[in-house]
Image (tube, rainbow, N blue to C red):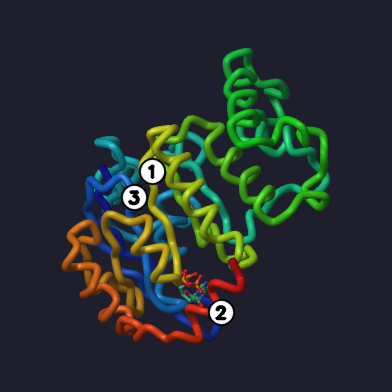
Amino acid sequence: MIDLDIQLTLSDARRRFELSARLSTEARFAVLYGPSGSGKTTTLQAIAGLQQPTAGRICIDGQTLFDHAGNINVPGRQRRVGYLFQQYALFPHLSVRANVEFGLTSWYKRRPSHEQRDRVEALLESFGLSAMENSLPRSLSGGQQQRVALARALACEPRILLLDEPFAALNPMLKDSLRAELAATCQQWGIPVLMITHDPEDVVQLAQVAFVFEAGRIVREIDVENGRMKEHLAQSLGQSPAPIDPRRQKLKAWLG
Ligand SMILES: Nc1ncnc2c1ncn2[C@@H]1O[C@H](COP(=O)(O)OP(=O)(O)OP(=O)(O)O)[C@@H](O)[C@H]1O
């Protein structure tokens, strides 16, 4: 489903970053994991057409989006890739509905078609956003803003959903319920997901496969679905299974 082999260089006057990423997976939910600055966001941006590789190719669902040798570079807007940015990047001056519709309109085509409006309606409904469709993002909670960003990413009928740390901006107490919500949503809309996270719990609970980045390279591929690999995963992520601490259990009970 995702087949990617790219080289990409980012540089300015004082810095140079070389990305050389290769991954191929049929998984419905794949995760990019690794330290800050290791190239995860750059990889997502290359898939979305926001960064252009210097060599290689990117195929999603059998369609070539980029192929340096074949001189193919499908423009970002035509890639049908849903992208949820870190911190969501909602337009503060646009209502919830206008944010969700945003990717469906342009300066020459101001109004979405009937079919597109129906899809937006269905998304607002299924994300529980109908009652706040005329509100501005600043009046929404973190979880609601995340849902608007997800609905916006899904509006263009994407063939893949790219999520850049969708839970990073959220209160940790919300994370668990939103994880479950995200898993259910992706299943409902039947769209494969490639998600960046720093949280091993996201990997264990959501992913079928995890690609571990280090310094611009993918150094490990972990089959998370295999139960034995989960243990291996926890070790490889630097987490040994926590001993059962009675105080911690008690605290958890108090917190409900
Ligand atoms: N214009 C640039 N010139 C040089 N280096 C750059 C430029 N833009 C980004 N970088 C570097 O590229 C590297 C990869 O960035 P990227 O955002 O892909 O990392 P990441 O793994 O997603 O990190 P995080 O988890 O913190 O979001 C970083 O070290 C960043 O500083």
In this rendering, position of residue 231 left or right of residue 88? left
Q: Secondary structure at mark 2?
A: helix
Label 2 belongs to which residue?
251
The quarter holding residue 38 reads bottom left
Give the x, y percent position of residue 74. 41, 39
Give the x, y percent position of residue 236. 26, 79
Sooner in the amino-acid sequence: mark 3 or mark 1? 3
Give the x, y percent position of residue 30. 32, 54
In this rendering, position of residue 203 left or right of residue 225? right
- Label 2: how many Cα within 10 Å (few below 14, some 14–19, many 20+): few
Q: Nearer the viewer, mark 2 or mark 3?
A: 2
Label 3 belongs to which residue?
29
- Label 1: how many Cα within 10 Å (few below 14, some 14–19, many 20+): some
| Residue type for callout 3 | Phe
245 over 212 or under it: above or below: below
Which image quarter is the C terminus in? bottom right
- Label 3: how many Cα within 10 Å (few below 14, some 14–19, many 20+): many
Sooner in the amino-acid sequence: mark 2 or mark 1? 1
Which image quarter is the N terminus in? top left
Counting labels gives 3
Q: Secondary structure at mark 1?
A: strand
The structure residue drawn at horizontal position 74% and vertical position 34%, both measured from the top left corner, is 98
The structure residue drawn at horizontal position 24% and vertical position 61%, both measured from the top left corner, is 224
In this rendering, position of residue 203 left or right of residue 22? right
Sooner in the amino-acid sequence: mark 2 or mark 3? 3
Label 1 belongs to which residue?
73
Give the camera-side residue of 135 and 153. 135
Give the x, y percent position of residue 163. 48, 53
